């Protein structure tokens, strides 16, 4: 890794880039979205006006890169990092929320096994974890949600 590479700045930038793309891909039309910023793990509960929502769905998308710096430029970050991380999550959430009236996302809680820089998408229960090693970089996207 180059000396100028800052994994925390990189993951924060990716989170900011990902937020508008996530909402444009997700297109919630019939379901209302509620974001709970309190960190939680699968099985957490959220009490909405419509009823109790169990946040039982958690999905992780792991991307491995030999040299992630080459994809961090303005022209490549969205195409090679953000979209491949978001699409599997959006697909899973979209299928789960189909015909439902409420989607609740919660900020995923840190785990003891987490290593690396952490970033969170503003207003949505999705976090990014960037772990940099000399030979490989791992970018993990994790989302926690429940529907009613």
Image (cartoon, grey):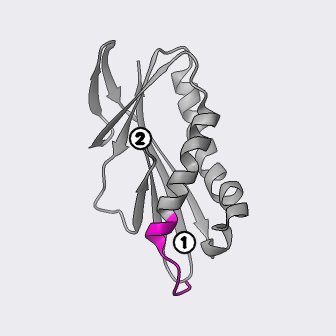
The local secondary structure at tag 2 comes to loop
Q: In the image, which is nearer the foreground, mark 1 or mark 2?
A: 2
Q: Is residue 145 above or below residue 10?
A: above
For residue 46, the mark is none
Residue occupying the far bottom of the picture: 3
Residue beneath disc 1: 137
Marks 1/2 in contact by CB < 8 Å: the verdict is no
Task: Give the secondary structure at mark 1.
Answer: strand
Q: Is residue 51 left or right of residue 6?
A: left
**Disc 1 packing (10 Å; few <14; some 14–19; many ≥20):** many
Of helix, strand and loop, which mostly describes the magenta segment? loop
Residue drawn at point x = 54 percent, y = 14 percent: 99
Q: Which quadrant of the figure contains the N terminus? A: bottom right
Seen at 62% across and 69% down, the residue is: 65
**Residue 7 within the segment the image draws in magenta:** yes
- Rendered location of residue 111, percent (x, y): 30, 56
Q: Provide the residue span drawn in magenta.
A: 1-10
Residue found 37% across the figure and 68% down from its top: 115
Judge by depth and name the residue closer to the eye, 40 or 71.
71
Quickly name the residue at label 2: 125
């Amino acid at each position: 890794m180059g000396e100028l590479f800052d994994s925390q700045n990189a993951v924060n930038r990716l989170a900011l880039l990902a937020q508008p793309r996530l909402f444009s891909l997700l297109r919630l039309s019939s379901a209302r979205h509620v974001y709970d910023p309190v960190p939680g793990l699968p099985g957490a509960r959220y009490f909405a006006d419509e009823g109790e929502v169990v946040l039982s769905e958690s999905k992780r998308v792991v991307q491995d890169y030999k040299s992630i710096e080459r994809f961090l430029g303005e022209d490549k970050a969205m195409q090679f990092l953000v979209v491949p991380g978001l699409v599997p999550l959006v697909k899973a959430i979209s299928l789960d929320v189909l015909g439902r009236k409420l989607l609740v996302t919660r900020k995923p809680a840190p785990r003891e096994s987490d290593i690396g820089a952490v970033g969170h998408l503003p207003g949505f229960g999705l976090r990014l974890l960037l772990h940099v090693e000399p030979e490989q970089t791992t970018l993990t996207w994790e989302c926690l949600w429940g529907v009613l």
